[in-house]
Amino acid sequence: MFSLHQTPGRTATVENKELLFFSGYSYLGMNQEPRFLQLLHEGIDLFGAVFPSSRISNTALELYTESEKILTDLTQTTDTVLFQSGFTAGKAAVEIIELGSQIFQSPFCHPAIRVNTNSLLSFSEWANETVQTINNNSFSSRPVILSDSLNQLTAEVYDFSFLNQIQQKIICIIDDSHGIGLLGSNGEGISSRLPRNENIEYIITYSLSKALNIPAGAISCTCKQTADKIRKTSWYTAVTPPSPASLYAFCNAANIYQQQREKLNKLKTALQNLVADKKAIHFHVDLPVFVLPEELDEYYFSKRGIIISSFAYPDPTGKKINRAVLNALHTNEDLQHFADAI
């Protein structure tokens, strides 16, 4: 366990010693990107840190609508609803599931959208079983599929092409917290990889904090009526909205996000090439995450001036998962140092 006294970026200081930081989820490094921080300062000057009012108040802040429009365009959906956090967004998404609906929950669902025990099957096994069950049965209401878009702990991006085989009308709720801002040519996340069939309604829920560094969440919907229904939940009406200063930065940082994403992609490819011959290290070509073997733990790397991610999840009493997580602030020299340590 490392006790930090400031937000880490490329490095972190522990007991007056600077260590390379290969942990955390600030994928694009926005927390220490000077141009983005300047936008945050401008946002505070214009809006303050908090807008202490309900979104359904008669004093609406246009900035929220503007942010939702940007996210709707980004995810190629019909409407987006902003929330204070990704967890809140997930809870609001599952709350509107029609009572009695048949739910098909994938092997990896974040607690924000989890309603049952996660399946013990592999993702592909679960997908095949789901297709067969839906196609071979009739339902009083549309079946609901729940899944995360990817698994950042095991470096997997899930393949949703199986949805093409489903013949009935369905609702698909996907948590894309670790994909939005990261995957896709413009950071559109998993939305660019989803089959767009008329029988599928998508409800994409996500945190904006992971890649985009915004303390907020959102739900992007392919059906306007669904977004309207979500806006009537207490998760939306009774909660203080996200920080307007952060959303101001988000609305004005498109070019910065794109440049940081390009930097990260180059670094990711470089490190993948450096460790390609290390069979014990697992990675996905689209993710800046490298899953490490048990013996390459936090103690091993700390002796070599590196902090990695090492904790048990989702069961805190379980086995630790060792990972190296890149961010756009790293340098090629940092990557070489990490590869040499291995």
Image (tube, grey):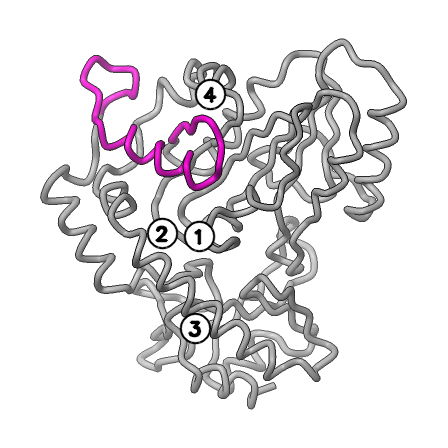
Q: Which residue is mark 2?
A: 213
Q: Which residue is mark 1?
A: 186
- Residues drawn in magenta: 53-82
Q: Is residue 56 magenta?
A: yes
Real-space Cα separation, disc 4 to disc 2, in angstroms: 24 Å
- Give the amino acid at mark 3: Phe
- Give the amino acid at mark 1: Asn
The local crowd at label 1, few if under 14, some if 14 to 19, many if 20 or more residues have their Cα within 10 Å, is some
Q: Which residue is mark 4?
A: 227
In the displayed image of the protein, which residue is found farthest to the bottom?
340
Of mark 4 and mark 3, the one earlier in the sequence is 3
- The relative height of residue 110 versus residue 116 in the rendered view (above or below) is below
Q: Which residue is mark 3?
A: 21
Of mark 3 and mark 1, the one earlier in the sequence is 3
Which of labels 4 and 2 is toward the front? 4
Q: Secondary structure at mark 2?
A: loop
Of mark 1 and mark 2, the one earlier in the sequence is 1
Which of labels 1 and 2 is toward the front? 1
Residue 72 percent location from the top left of the image? 42, 34
